[in-house]
Image: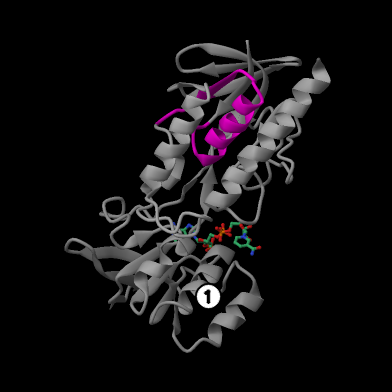
Amino acid sequence: MYDIIIIGAGPAGLTAAIYARRAAKSVLVLEAKFYGGQIINTPDIENYPACAHVSGYDFAGKIYEQAKALGAEILYEKASEIKDNGDEKEVITDEGSHLARAVIIATGSKNRKLGLEGEDELIGRGVSYCATCDGAFYRKKAVAVVGGGNTALEDALYLADIVEKVYLIHRRDSFRGDEATAELLKGRGNVEFVLNSTVTKLNAQNTLESVEVTDNSGKTRTLEVSGLFVAVGRIPENKEFGELVKLDENGYIVAGEDCVTSARGIFAAGDNRVKTVRQLVTATADGAVAATEAIKYLKEKI
Ligand code: NAP
């Protein structure tokens, strides 16, 4: 039996592994796809302290190597369930099952996509799901943001300070996000609202060149943009654990800054828990906190 099983080998999970191993706990990390999580797709990270420029691939590789060198065991298996038998937790995977005294769920979340042809291929070449990560690459260019929630509104506001022009495309005529932020956007001379409209086509040679938007009457317009920031919500990867830990109405694990969930000995770290800022730095911070709380929990059990 392991001291701690960590589900997910993204920045949160691997940081938790580093902290747990440094406290001499036995650690198994389970990963369904490949280590690194969503950061692996980011071409250039500019906002992580002490790393002015690092590719997501290199960053993920370094945390992975660090966790491995410290003795974390990593298996590529998809966790489908956690059976909570009190002091013993059983994690069921597609390959079998593993036992631990504590579990950290660090499964992250995935971007909701528009489902347009070419969307996946253009990630990093015009299509982005993170304005704070990629906005600086579009300095003095025209971009579009799609979505009507707080993320889209705040992304548009953030980008308006950097880029030449922002089109904010939303499928309805009123925003789901805060009125105050929408009012701030109205005051920006370089932001144009494109309401009652959806993006229907991406035009690209090698990189994005324009997007086609179609309004509710069926009229189509082409917007010359080199960046499209998709902010139509995220999907937390928690559905396997909803029976065990409390989730909020959007499917995020209810856990505060201490990463403690509603189930004793089960912790949540990273983008899959309720929080306001979902960034690389907050994911790694969660990893440290969740591991520290798990270690504290194990000590109380001795
Ligand atoms: P969200 O609130 O779920 O908004 C998603 C937006 O995308 C909605 O406007 C929705 O349109 C639109 N949408 C969904 N699917 C679409 C599709 N296929 N095509 C086009 N548009 C689509 O997501 P979010 O903005 O990421 O925010 C998530 C949560 O975090 C919210 O609770 C939000 O308030 C919170 N948040 C808070 C802050 C803050 O407090 N500063 C900052 C960011 C986010 P409809 O409106 O028509 O459904």
At x 37%, y 50%, the residue is 55
Residue closest to the eye, 156 or 59: 59
At x 41%, y 52%, the residue is 113
Above or below: residue 22 compared with residue 94: below
At x 63%, y 10%, the residue is 1
Q: Is residue 271 visible?
A: no
Q: Is residue 286 visible?
A: yes
In terms of image quarters, where does ligand 1 lie?
A: bottom right
Q: Secondary structure at mark 1?
A: helix
Above or below: residue 79 compared with residue 8: above
* Residue 299 percent across, percent down from the top left: 79, 21
The quarter of the rendered structure image containing the C terminus is top right
Above or below: residue 182 compared with residue 23: below
In-image side of 298 versus 168 (left or right): right
Q: Which residue is mark 1?
A: 157
| Type of amino acid under label 1 | Leu
Residue closest to the eye, 132 or 255: 132
Residue 218 shown in magenta:
no
**Seen from this angle, which residue lies furthest left?**
205
At x 36%, y 67%, the residue is 137
The colour scheme applied to this rendered structure is one colour
* Residue 213 percent across, percent down from the top left: 33, 71
- What range is drawn magenta here? 8-33
* Residue 62 percent across, percent down from the top left: 43, 38
In-image side of 102 versus 67 (left or right): right
Residue closest to the eye, 184 or 221: 184
* Residue 60 percent across, percent down from the top left: 43, 40
Binning the other alpha carbons within 10 Å of mark 1 as few (below 14), some (14 to 19) or many (20 upward) gives: many
